[in-house]
Image (spheres, rainbow, N blue to C red):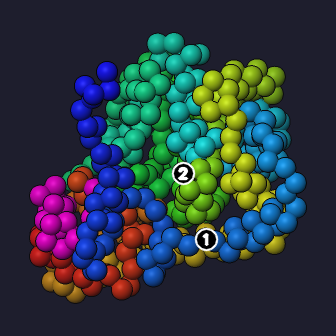
Amino acid sequence: MLERLDMAPPDPILGLTAAFKADPNPGKINLGVGVYQDDQGRTPVLDAVRQAEERILATETSKNYLPIDGQPEYGRAVQELLLGEDHPVVSSGRAVTLQTPGGTGGLRVAGDFIRQHCPGATLWLSEPTWANHPKVFESAGVPVKTYPYYDAGSRDLASEAMLAAVRQIPAGDVLLVHGCCHNPTGVDPSPETWEELAGTIRERGILPLVDFAYQGLGDGLRTDARGLEALCDRQEEILVASSFSKNFGLYNERVGALTLVAANADTAERALSHLKITVRTNYSNPPAHGGAIVTQVLTDTTLRRAWEDEVEAMRNRIQGMRTLFVETLQAKGVKRDFSFIQKQRGMFSFSGLTPDQVQRLRDEYSIYMVGSGRINVAGMTTGNMDRLCQAVAAVL
């Protein structure tokens, strides 16, 4: 039977990494996969993470299974990071949290839960969105449709078109929104648009699912949560998939969460009992090490302060690369206006480069980016910026 299988196509993003690694050009640049890099082009282990690991290894006495939903201390720390320890959703017990294998694991658990307990619901994704979103939910058996999000002409949010589309979504459907640092565009709703969107979701009876993978890398840990807070002010029920790959640098530890908010604590616990069944029939229980790191850092005052400083440094470096990219293109004589890059937030931006230009950058200059023109700004460094901008100027 297996002999009949054709070769499956490579992942459009992770496949770039394989091609990049195979490229012998010493000046190659990878702006494809969404991994943070420092100015030396390394993906570092954060100091706060290293210190937490040392403590864990010094005190660990067992490798026993975790509970299906992970450790309670982890769940509480996640909720307090998302919303703050004094937020009514947290203090009232309306939220329950599962530790999941990365943010993607949280999304898949959410997809399975929606398929089982929201029969007939369609899940709506922004156009564009992260390339893996539709695949995750279609694999879970959830029908997927899209709503307008990005205006390619203005390089900004298509807010009126988005809100008009949301007003037409049937009650009971699910709307996925990016909590901050929209992937792939880097364009987020303004505080006013978040408020209007949250009100529309409430009026339509839609279930919001927030993909919150980049908290802290936009404008700050609390500021980045303003969209989630706007939803919590109006919604009784919310799903939140969060990740610690980016803001903790824990890419290969696969540590994330799915948080469910319900109308009251009793409903939340009943929903959690069904989520546990979903997990048990999938990966049974979560891996321990990454969650232990996150818990250690978030619950220790000294480590928490050190981690927040490191997140701020990452955020400032990314924003600095945005500014340097725009300035260097101008210095190279590029007439096209790239100032929109500076206004966007997070690791990603839509560059406006065409698929043909992206292919030329790869073939002629060993510069790798997604065919849509999405660039990972965190892959830029002061060392590779001149070469990058010279190549972009050449293909424009």
Residue bearing the label numbered 2? 213
Q: Tell me if 40 is positioned left or right of 375 in this view.
A: right
Quadrant where the N terminus sits is top left
Residue at the image point whose x is 36% and y is 43% from the top: 131
- The quarter holding residue 331 reads bottom left
The percent position of residue 280, horizontal first and vertical second, equals 67, 26
Q: Mark 1 against mark 2, which lies toward the viewer? A: 1
On the image, the x and y values in percent for residue 100 come to 64, 41
Residue 200: % across, % down: 49, 31
Occupied quadrant, residue 252? bottom right
In which quadrant will I find the C terminus? bottom left
Part of the protein shown in magenta: 353-370
Q: Mark 1 or mark 2, which has the lower sequence index? A: 1
The residue pinned by badge 1 equals 45
Specify the amino acid type for callout 2: Ala
As shown in the figure, which amino acid type bears the numbered disc 1? Val
